[in-house]
Image (spheres, coloured by chain):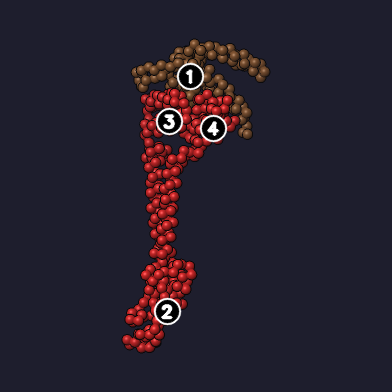
């Protein structure tokens, strides 16, 4: 095992679990089309996402009813599929925020990293 | 020939469509539509084919994997540091994380030096390779036949004297070549030729040595009894038959094998598809 392998695995699992809710959080600010959404997420340091990760995820969120889509013409390119939160998506995001804060506080407390930012 | 950005995108979408053939139709259509739209958008913004390539690379890779492991196998089926498949296609069909997923459009493979080739280029190259291999085989077989015939004929010639003695004039007084007279060597190894297929080698008769036409030479007495008649083989012809058979069999095998290879999906893709099917069946 390479040094730091456990740490990387933990981080990968955390990302995997949190990414759908990060997508929901970005969409909570307003509807976005795929290319734009990926641009926002790609700028978030630490998420380590790529286009190939996001589209299947969006497809799953749509099938779970957490987001909905609509096609809109674009002035500067092909028609775009816009994603927006549904009511279920907003509830799921609110629940996750609450759970995450509690989880983060607990972990921070155990790790002794609380208040360090 | 370097593929253009549009050709790369078309090839990518074709591979993606093939790699997701086992997904439910609605999921697959959604994914293909999303990726196609994304690539159109990327092409609109791209200033050059290099940027299109970069967009395709991002679609077919996971930066996290690259950071996590220097041995990351990249797109469409790479593995994370914990060894679990990290394909972007996982969980696409509700499968649990970590389960195998269908191969992505960019299956991991060893990169070769030089520009990437798209599917059409590979097909053309494959056909060219088949033709070249077949021609090489045929010419090689002919060359081998000639060489073997030459060697065999030389060997037979060296033992010609054991059978027929030195070149001697025939009954008609005309010199006959004895170089085919390799019966002592060749007959135990090769099937005996019928007279019609054999080559007349020479005759051994009552020899005389004396002056003839003003010079001293050995000659066969005209009208003497033929003590022995040697027959031999046209070795290139006879050796060519088995070589030709081997060539035809090899060429047929090559053609069938190549066709089967083209029809057979990559082993990895099959394995991953089977894993996906198993994961669907699992409760």
Real-space CA distance between mark 1 and mark 2, rounded to the nearest whole angstrom: 96 Å
Residue tagged 4: B275
Question: x, y (%) of residue B58?
Answer: 46, 29
Above or below, B30 relative to B183: above
Real-space CA distance between mark 1 and mark 3, rounded to the nearest whole angstrom: 20 Å
Q: Colour of chain B?
A: red
**Looking at the image, which residue is at 41% across and 66% down?**
B235
**Looking at the image, which residue is at 52% across and 24% down?**
B94
Residue B68 in view, yes or no: no
Circle nearer the viewer, 2 or 3: 2
Real-space CA distance between mark 4 and mark 3, rounded to the nearest whole angstrom: 19 Å
Residue tagged 1: A63
Chain ID of residue with mark 4: B
Question: x, y (%) of residue B32?
Answer: 42, 26
Q: Nearer the viewer, residue B138 or B217?
A: B138
Quarter location, residue A15: top right
Question: Can marks 2 and 4 be said to lie on one chain?
Answer: yes
**Looking at the image, which residue is at 43% across and 47% down?**
B256
- Asked if marks 2 and 4 touch (Cβ < 8 Å), the reply is no
Residue tagged 2: B228
Chain letter, colour brown: A
Q: Quadrant of the C terminus of chain A?
A: top right
């Amino acid at each position: 095992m390479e040094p730091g392998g456990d740490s990387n695995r933990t981080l990968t699992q955390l990302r995997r679990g949190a990414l759908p809710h990060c997508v929901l959080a970005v969409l909570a600010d307003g509807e976005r089309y795929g290319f734009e959404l990926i641009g926002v997420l790609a700028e978030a340091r630490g998420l380590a996402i790529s286009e190939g990760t996001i589209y299947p995820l969006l497809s799953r969120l749509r099938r779970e009813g957490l987001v909905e889509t609509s096609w809109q013409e674009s002035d500067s390119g092909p028609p775009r599929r816009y994603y927006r939160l549904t009511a279920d998506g907003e509830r799921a995001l609110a629940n996750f925020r609450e759970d995450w804060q509690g989880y983060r506080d607990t972990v921070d407390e155990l790790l002794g990293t609380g208040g360090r930012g | 020939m370097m593929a253009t950005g549009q050709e790369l995108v078309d090839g990518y979408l074709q591979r993606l469509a093939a790699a997701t053939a086992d997904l439910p139709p609605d999921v697959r259509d959604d994914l293909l539509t999303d990726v196609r739209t994304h690539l159109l958008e990327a092409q609109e913004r791209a200033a050059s084919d290099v940027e299109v390539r970069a967009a395709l690379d991002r679609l077919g890779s996971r930066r996290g994997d690259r950071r996590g492991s220097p041995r990351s196998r990249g797109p469409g089926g790479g593995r994370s540091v914990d060894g679990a498949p990290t394909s972007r296609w996982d969980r696409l069909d509700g499968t649990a994380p970590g389960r195998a997923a269908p191969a992505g459009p960019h299956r991991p493979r060893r990169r070769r030096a030089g520009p990437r080739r798209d599917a059409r280029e590979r097909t053309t190259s494959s056909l060219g390779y088949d033709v070249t291999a077949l021609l090489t085989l045929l010419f090689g077989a002919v060359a081998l036949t000639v060489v073997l015939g030459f060697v065999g004929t030389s060997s037979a010639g060296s033992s010609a004297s054991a059978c027929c003695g030195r070149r001697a004039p025939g009954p008609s007084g005309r010199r006959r070549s004895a170089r085919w007279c390799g019966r002592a060597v060749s007959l135990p190894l090769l099937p005996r030729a019928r007279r019609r297929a054999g080559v007349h080698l020479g005759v051994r008769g009552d020899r005389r040595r004396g002056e003839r036409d003003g010079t001293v030479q050995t000659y066969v007495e005209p009208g003497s009894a033929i003590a022995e008649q040697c027959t031999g083989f046209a070795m290139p012809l006879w050796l060519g038959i088995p070589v030709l058979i081997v060539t035809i069999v090899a060429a047929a095998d090559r053609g069938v094998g190549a066709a089967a290879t083209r029809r057979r999906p990559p082993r990895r893709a099959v394995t991953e598809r089977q894993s996906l099917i198993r994961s669907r069946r699992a409760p």
